Amino acid sequence: MHHPTQHTPASEAARTALIEEAEAATGILPPHATLVGLEERLRAEIQAAVDIVRIQADRLNRGTTDWYQRDCALAEARHATEEGLGAGLRSAAVHVARLGRCLRILDTFVQVKPKA
């Protein structure tokens, strides 16, 4: 997985806007440069979220539903970030949309407040 240096995670509203932009990328295809920028931002946010979700998963009992959900989200993020934009505009848009979906799923766990 790509490891950005010293990334400060975006606000919840900024992450939501980024996810929505990524998911919309497969409609009217944006320019390649836009997709490159989206991919870079998504990768940084995904890495920040992965770090948080991995800590959460490590604190849970292995095999529980909560642990399994996080493990699946982490595996999908790993697979998605191992791939690149591809050769064409459509493949780049599909890849960016996949990264957006990964971030949306990870973000649901990031936003979970610890049980008191």
Image (cartoon, helix red, strand yellow):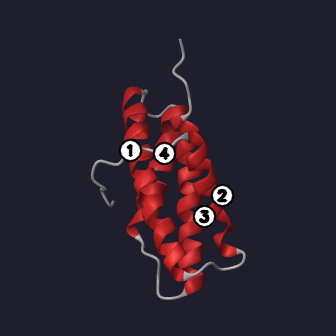
Mark 1 — residue? 8
| x 51%, y 31%: residue | 64
Q: Please give left or right for residue 6 compared with residue 73 in the image.
A: left
Mark 2, secondary structure of its residue: helix
Residue type at mark 3: give it: Ala
Q: Please give left or right for residue 38 compared with residue 61 in the image.
A: right
Tell me whether circle 4 and circle 2 mark residues in contact (CB < 8 Å). Answer: no
Q: CA distance from mark 1 to mark 3?
A: 20 Å
Q: Give the x, y percent position of residue 82.
A: 38, 67
Mark 3 — residue? 22
Labels 3 and 4: the sequence-earlier one? 4
Residue type at mark 1: give it: Thr
Q: Give the x, y percent position of residue 22.
A: 60, 64
Name the image quarter holding residue 52. Answer: top left
Q: Please give left or right for residue 104 compared with residue 39 in the image.
A: right
Mark 4 — residue? 10
Across the whole image, how many numbered discs are drawn on residues? Answer: 4
